[in-house]
Image (cartoon, helix red, strand yellow):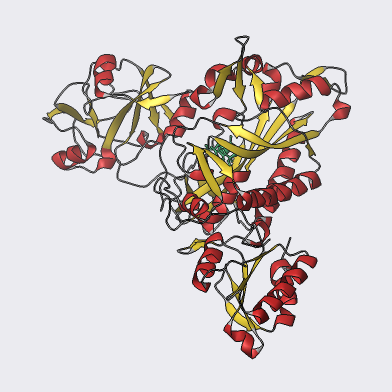
Amino acid sequence: MKMSNLFVQTLRDYPADAEVVSHKMLVRAGYIRKLTNGVYTFLPLMWRVIKKIENIVREEMDASGAQEILMPIVQPKELWEESGRWEVYGKELMRFTDRHDRMLALAPTAEEVVTWVAREGIKSYRQLPVNLYQIQNKYRDEIRPRFGLLRGREFIMKDAYSFDADQEGLEKSYEVMAQAYTRIFKRCGLDTRMVRSDSGAIGGSLSHEFMVLVETDSGENDVLYCDCCDYASNTNHAQTQPVPANTDGGFSKCEVVSTPNIKSIEDLSAFLKVEPSVICKALVYIADGKPVQIMIRGDQSLEETKLKNALGANEIRIASSVEIAEYLGAEAGFVGLKNAKCRVIADNSVKDLKNFVIGLNEKDVHQVGANWGIDYELPELFDVRLSKAGEACPVCGKPLKMTQGIEVGNIFQLGTKYSSKMNAVFQDVDGNEKPFIMGCYGIGVSRTAAAAIEKFHDDFGIKWPKEIAPYEAILIPVNINDEEQMKIVNELYVSFQKAGIEVLMDDRDERAGVKFKDADLIGIPLRITLGKTLAEGLVEYKLRMTDETGKISPDKVLDFALDYLRKDRL
Ligand code: ATP
Ligand code: MG
């Protein structure tokens, strides 16, 4: 493709509304254009990248034995009622009404539809296992669709669904997908960590996320990982070992002390001259409309996803001071366990507290020297604590590190969650009806492209991994009025195309500086420049990923390019 014909407009500046690197660069380099919040047009360069990722996904999914289908984006409400998710999916589900007043939704995912497909088409265990997948647009009315392709309201997802006759089969299907995913991301030039995760709205028991660990602040997930073993986990699921601390308040008797206007853990600890780790902190949340009180050690913080799972709630939020007064008759900062008026749970961290400090549901006083079993019953215990960097790895005990991770894929063991509710059954060997044992497996295709940029870029632009770059090489004649340059560049252009290299030629009548800037910005892996060095019979090359440069004679360029671009292809 000649640059003079390519439909691309690079911008001088980054867009003002973009917060993350990938969004900034994709807009500035002319890959995408925003139509409305979270909804983008994929311009030619972007669409080439997307198609390359899709092809890799397709090849690996096909190789794993999965079969491609295409399900509708428009899904009827009735199906979502069968699974029970019409109610619980919440505001992210984009719903609309047709002219006959029937309610429909735009697919955020396709468990319901694929379960219907299986219910209609699979009758006997002989037809199992089956894995069906599609690459299709998805729609989610995200609260903050502000990170470009990382979090769109319309985006491209590969979603696969496995159907097995038993749990053993599901585990096999799950493992096959886990391996396919690792290969898919590797071929996209991305190292991923497979981390245990929260199953969220999709549900089911076991799930893993595939995370690209990045240094940029991509606004995505905090990931705790271990350098010494394979352990890695989203912080919303991490289960680190208990944090050692002094848990004995050392008070010789249990008594009420005056703590005028002392509400925060910090102030209370300073005022009483005790460590925060001997204070039994109370937090109040509203879970699906009802108040719940959570006790946690004063030096620890709460993890909301863990809390949501512990409570089995659909929606939680922190209670306001007005709600605390209304529901508990207490003032925020003085909440305790005395005459508790709502459900109380506790984090494991409070278990070992002795002679501790706690609120009394009474303004301006706290109790010191309290003990479980004497002053209070230990509430029901859960792990709802936020794990932090430096805490001990649950596998090998070494200190964990924290980084940002972008979730590019997610795999779930669903079991019979959908098949039971939707009565999707088959006949087993003995002729009994059984619900399918299902798994589901997603890859954010458009998010993967953005994640690659978050991982690989510099101040000048994108550094595409070779296999997903929109073009593999760019030829730049410094001066298009120089006949010698144009003769050689045209020869190279033809020979690259014949060899199957996807090549751009910058034939624009622009200054060399402009051409170099654009090549760096759009991130083409191999740049060949024809300029001054032609006098010595050489052209210059530059590898975008490593910044390596060198000179080479024109008749060696093709072999050099083929070698560099194809050598470690999986
Ligand atoms: P997140 O937690 O990031 O909102 P999710 O866990 O809800 O994502 P899944 O239901 O697991 O997402 O969807 C499968 C994959 O689709 C995700 O791993 C991710 O790569 C991609 N994806 C999900 N939501 C979006 C979005 N709004 N924009 C782009 N890609 C997305
Ligand atoms: Mg997910």
Q: Quadrant of the C terminus?
A: bottom right
Residue at horizontal 45%, vertical 41%?
Answer: 146
Q: Quadrant of residue 323?
A: top left
Is any part of residue 226 visible from this angle?
Answer: no
Residue 3 image offset from top left, x and y in percent = 62, 62
Identify the residue at image location x=15%, y=33%.
262
Tell which of 280 and 560 is nearer to you.
560
Give the vertical position of 550 relative to 431 (above or below).
Answer: below
- Residue 297 visible: yes
Q: Is residue 78 above or below residue 390?
A: above
Q: Is residue 483 left or right of residue 252?
A: right
Q: Residue 407 placed where, x, y %?
A: 55, 45
The residue under the point 54% across, 25% down is 93
For residue 343, side relative to residue 139 (left or right): left
Question: In the figure, 551 relative to 75: above or below?
Answer: below
Q: Is residue 28 left or right of residue 110?
A: left
Near-viewer residue (467 or 482):
482
Q: Residue at x 67, y 88 (%)?
A: 537
Give the quarter of the figure containing the N terminus: bottom right
Determine the residue located farthest toward the bottom in the rendered image: 536
Q: Position of residue 339 (x, y in %)?
A: 27, 16
The answer to which of 136 and 492 lies nearer the viewer is 492
Image-quadrant location for residue 420: top right
Res 294 → quadrant: top left
Which is nearer the eye, 214 or 507?
Answer: 507
Q: Ligand 2: which quarter?
A: top right
Decide: is 59 above or below 169. below
